[in-house]
Image (spheres, rainbow, N blue to C red):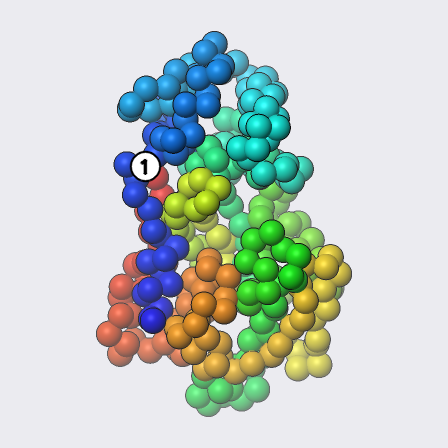
Amino acid sequence: MSYLDKIRACNACNPTDFLPWMLAGERVGAVRRTLATHLKRWPDQFHVDDVRVDWYGAPDSMAARSAVLAGVVDILVAAGLIEPLQGEPYAVTPNRRDQARCLIDRAAAPWFGVRAFGQHLNGFVRTGRGDPGTQIQLWVGRRSANRRVSPLHLDNLVAGGLPYGVSLRDNLRKECHEEAAIPTAIADQAVPVSAITYCRDAARGLKPDLMYCYDLELPESFVPRCTDGEVESFTRMPAAEVARLVRDTDEFKLNCNLVVIDFLIRHGVIAQEDPDYIALIQGLRSPLP
């Protein structure tokens, strides 16, 4: 296995398996061909053919569109086609979060191939100024056994979805508190460092995702503590060991590998002499449909 294998796994997708979901001439998502036929039960809303899914009956206002879509999603959930709702509104957007055309529940976003946004934070301790592989140590969480996605896999110190209408700063503060008991005063020291994009064919649909990434240097005395039950335990380990786990195992939740790889590049653990260096940098910013 290699770092590139993890990036490729996050971008495993055959675009021809999906139909573009169009709204007023804009692509706002993509529906798996084998599922698109279910939208034909709303002929006053959706036109489905071999080329695209056109939401031609969408109301004019964002609120009305969101209400109509919520009714459709409720029926698809009742039919077992979409998992139970999570109560987090995501933007249905052709591009940025602030360009939302309507809202959709987080659970339904992959079914409609809606672009999703999240925040991932690498918490680390610097024990010296020598070899970054040994002198930088990363806090790594192990996901709880009851997590719906990737139970018991390793995770970044803090990671979570970014609901519509919540600012980057406020959401990061909330996730830091819930997932690692990081006080606001420390959470506010997190440094925005990059953004990672990938597009993956997942069991629930298409995931064209964008992750905002942060570094947070923590004092040696700080020990994270989960407050929402989503993490089973935390371990602090040298960056070189984290690098080995990412490169050689499937221990980490799939998209968290990318966040760690980005950290390892920026902090010199993956050196410029690495033969895959350029390919890794380019692979972390895959074009989104």
Check the image and report above or below for 225 versus 80: below
Please give the name of the residue rendered at 33% of the width and 64% of the height, measured from the top-left corner. 5
Residue 277 drawn above or below residue 146: below
Q: Is residue 123 left or right of residue 3?
A: right
Quarter of the image that includes the N terminus? bottom left
User: Residue drawn at (33%, 46%), measured in percent from left and top?
Assistant: 13
Q: For residue 27, which quarter of the picture?
A: top left
The residue that mark 1 highlights is 17
From the viewer's side, name the closer residue of 164 and 143: 143
Find residue 61 and report its horizontal and vertical position in percent. 55, 17
Q: Single out the residue that lies furthest toward the front.
A: 79
Q: Quadrant of residue 6?
A: bottom left
Q: Residue drawn 36% across and 43% down?
A: 288
For the residue carrying disc 1, how many other residues have a C-alpha within 10 Å: few (<14), some (14-19), or many (20+)? Answer: few
Horizontal and vertical percent position of residue 192: 52, 59
Quadrant where the image shows the C terminus? top left
- Pinpoint residue 280: horizontal percent, then vertical percent: 32, 64
Q: Nearer the viewer, residue 172 or 284?
A: 284
Image quarter of residue 177? bottom right
Q: Secondary structure at mark 1?
A: helix
Q: Amino acid at mark 1?
A: Asp
Residue 9: image location, x then y, percent: 36, 57
Q: Residue furthest left?
A: 275
Foreground: 230 or 215? 230
Q: Is residue 87 positioned above or below 42 on the image? A: below
Q: Is there any visible trace of residue 282 in the rendered image? A: yes
Q: Is residue 91 visible?
A: no
Identify the residue at horizontal 48%, vertical 52% (top origin).
Answer: 211
User: Residue 73, relative to residue 185: is it above or below?
Assistant: above
